[in-house]
Image: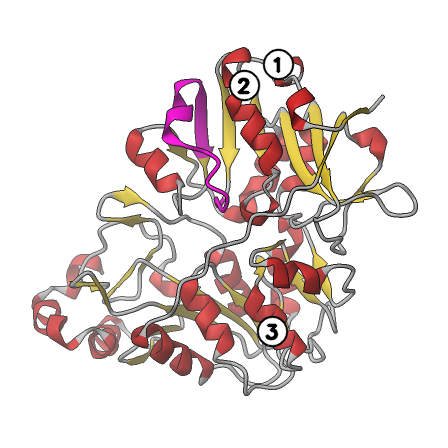
Amino acid sequence: MTVHLDSPGKLDFACYVRPGDTVIWGQACAEPVALTSRLLERRADIGRFRCFLGLPAAGTVQVEHGDRVSFVSYCGAGGNRALWQSGALDILPSPYSALPALFASRRFPIDVVLLLVPPPDEDGRYCLGLAEEYLPPAIDAARVVIAEVSENVPWVHGSRLLDETEIDVIVHTVTEPAAAGRKRPGAAERRIAELVAGLVEDGSTLQCGIGALPETILRALAGHRDLGVHSGLVTDAVADLMQAGVVTNARKTVDRHVSVGGMLMGSKRLFSFAHRNPAVRLRPTAYTHDPRVLGTQRKFVAINSALEVDLTGQVNAEIAAGNYVGAVGGALDFVRGAHASPGGKAIVALPSESGGHSRIVGELRGPVSTPRSEVDFVVTEHGVADLRGLGLAGRREAMLAVAAPGHRAALTASDVRRTA
């Protein structure tokens, strides 16, 4: 029988979370903040346990929580960076698309799932709120499911609905979903966006990564026609393009007239737009990152950023200055989907420098997150390096042309054969 509580303060987590358990919750805006705050507040009641973290948005998890909780994540973004630097966070260097299978097989065991969902529909079923992505296999594999139900969470169409019998505890709140922060783009980001927009043809289906630059790129597409969206996330910029009639999804081969994503990540404006909107649909990671689905889309364009790219086109999206700040993520899944798509393109976009250091490098200072064999275009504010069909010498020349001018001499002195 499902237990109903009218306050998170009445939830005794020690009755549901056992020492050694792994707890997971929706990432970013889908975090059930009332539940996660209560869990961490009462961590001493449980004994040592583990939490799997995604992208943070609410700032709930702090370094001091590492006294009783072990944290693991697929990414080092946002507040996860402080956890990593303190030694409280372990990194699971897994492709994003591999997470569902890890959870389903219990090779990475999930014991307790925390959800943030809206009230049920007229048939008593609950949607998953702001995220599906890797939550369905976690729900199916878990021993306990606890849902925070708030009327302020939008009902978003998806592929998974839960009966009340699938939820062990329902906690009623008036939680407002956490909003994702937004940075104002600089001149370099705006120029990169213009150049990337020039590579995107009308009728293309887009995937865009996470961060200020991909969002700026989307906004630069306001003059395009009949774009589609099939991505890991749907953002404010996607909603704006849909309202403006730029994103119509009319030319998509699959999911025509529908923008597809794994989660919503943005502001209250996005949440209101997506509420019961049949043109927005959330799907699990097994679908959003499926190479068969991606390759079926005509003119599928994968747009992702990076921390650095070397002169042969190898991409590091994980480590900067010795800190794990990125992720293996899903970029490679989408890049390979673009290669399989008729007319597809794989684009890596990044500013040419940061803090006076070149982000076009002779040798990567981190792991290879995307092999050079998979990258079509590298775009900086200094131009577009089209790497298709180029040998190592040609790639070196093309990459030098998009590096910051002040760093080109030093890069010219580097030996591309060291990364051959």
> Which image quadrant: the N terminus?
top right
Between 43 and 220, the residue placed more toward the observer is 43
- Does residue 81 lie above or below 216 as drawn? above
Label 2 or label 3, whichever comes before in sequence order: 2
Between 291 and 237, the residue placed more toward the observer is 237
> Which image quadrant: the C terminus?
bottom left
Q: Which mark is residue 42?
A: 2
> Please, what is the three-letter code of the amino acid marked with disc 2?
Arg
Q: Residues within 10 Å of mark 2 (few under 14, many from 20)?
A: some
Between 8 and 276, the residue placed more toward the observer is 8
Quadrant location of residue 214? bottom left
> Please, what is the three-letter code of the amino acid marked with disc 1?
Ala
Q: Which residue is mark 3?
A: 240
Label 1 or label 2, whichever comes before in sequence order: 1
**405 sits left or right of 128 in the view:** left
- Does residue 41 lie above or below 58 as drawn? above
Label 3 or label 1, whichever comes before in sequence order: 1
Residue drawn at the location 30% of the way across and 30% of the way down: 86
Work out how far the residue at label 2 is from the one at label 3, CA to CA, in angstroms. Answer: 41 Å
Q: Which residue is mark 1?
A: 14
Is residue 389 visible in the rendered structure shown here?
no
> Please, what is the three-letter code of the amino acid marked with disc 3?
Asp
Q: Which residues are magenta?
A: 55-72
